[in-house]
Image (tube, rainbow, N blue to C red):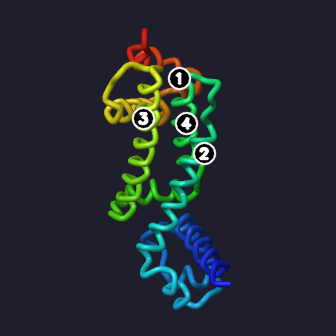
Amino acid sequence: MAIDRKQSVLDAASKSFSLFGYKATTMDQVAKMANVGKGTIYTFFKNKEELFDEIVSRMIRDMLQQAESAISSERTFFENAQAAIYRMLQFRTEHQLMLKLVQEQEMGTSAVKDVLVQVENEILTYIKNRIEAAIAKGEIQNCDPEVTAFLLVKMYIALVYDWEKQHKPLSEQQIGELIELYFLRGLFTK
C-alpha cells in the first residue's frame, strides 16, 4: 500500500513539474494531484527538492536506457555512438519534464540549471564510457575519452539544435556524415 502511495506521489509530482515547472509546483498541489494528504508526501520525501531529485534520477535512468537500447553489436563504434547520442537528445526533446525544465532554465531557476547540468553530465559520462570501451577494443585510437565525449556531444548538439535556428534542419544521416567527416575519421585506427 505504501509503495502504491509513493508511486502515486511520484506520478503526481512528475506531472506537476512537467506542467507547471519546478518553481510553480508546491507540495500541496502534488498532494491534491496524488489524492493523498500532504503529510503522506513527507513520509517518503523530506522536501520538494528531494522529491524533484527522485523524479530527475528516474528520468535520467530512462534516458540512459533509451541510449542503451540504441546500441547494437552489429554496428561500428561510430554508428553506435551516433545512435546513442541521437536517442538521448531525442529523449530530451520529447520528454515533457525535460521540455519544461529547458523552458524554466531560461528564467534562471538555479535548481533547474543544476538538473540540466546533471543530465548533460550523465550523457557525457555514458559516451565517455563507450569511448573507453572502444579504445580498449582497438576500434578507435587512444584519445582523452572525457574531452572526446564532450566534443562529440557538443558537435552533435550544435548540428541538431543550433544549426536549425537559422538553417533548414539536417537529417540524422547528414549529421552522422558531417560528424564522421569533421571529427571521427581522425579517431579510427588505421
The relative height of residue 176 versus residue 72 in the rendered view (above or below) is: above
The residue mark sitting in front, 2 or 3, is: 2
Counting the numbered discs, the total is 4
Q: Which residue is mark 4?
A: 84
What distance separates the C-alpha of mark 3 from that of mark 4? 10 Å
Tell me the kind of residue under disc 1: Gly
Q: Closer to the camera, 66 or 94? A: 66
Give the crowd class for mark 3: few <14, some 14-19, many >=20 residues within 10 Å. Answer: many
Q: CA distance from mark 2 to mark 4?
A: 8 Å
Q: Nearer the viewer, mark 4 or mark 1?
A: 4
Q: Residue at x 36, y 35 (%)?
A: 150
| 10 Å crowding of disc 2: few (<14), some (14-19), many (20+) | some
Residue indicated by mark 2: 66
- Toward the viewer: 190 or 123? 190
Spot occupied by residue 63 in the image (x, y as percentages of width and height): 55, 49
Density class for disc 4 (Cα within 10 Å; few <14, some 14-19, many ≥20) is many
Amino acid at circle 2:
Gln
**Residue at image mark 1:** 176
Q: State the CA–CA distance, disc 1 to disc 2.
A: 19 Å
The amino acid marked with disc number 3 is Val
Badge 2 or badge 4: first in the primary sequence: 2
Q: Earlier in the sequence, mark 1 or mark 2?
A: 2
Question: Label 3, on which residue?
Answer: 153
Asked which secondary structure carries label 4, the reply is helix
Judging from the image, what secondary structure is the residue with disc 2 in?
helix
Circles 3 and 4: CB distance less than 8 Å?
no
Which kind of residue does numbered mark 4 sit on? Ala
Label whose residue precedes the other's in the sequence (1 or 3): 3
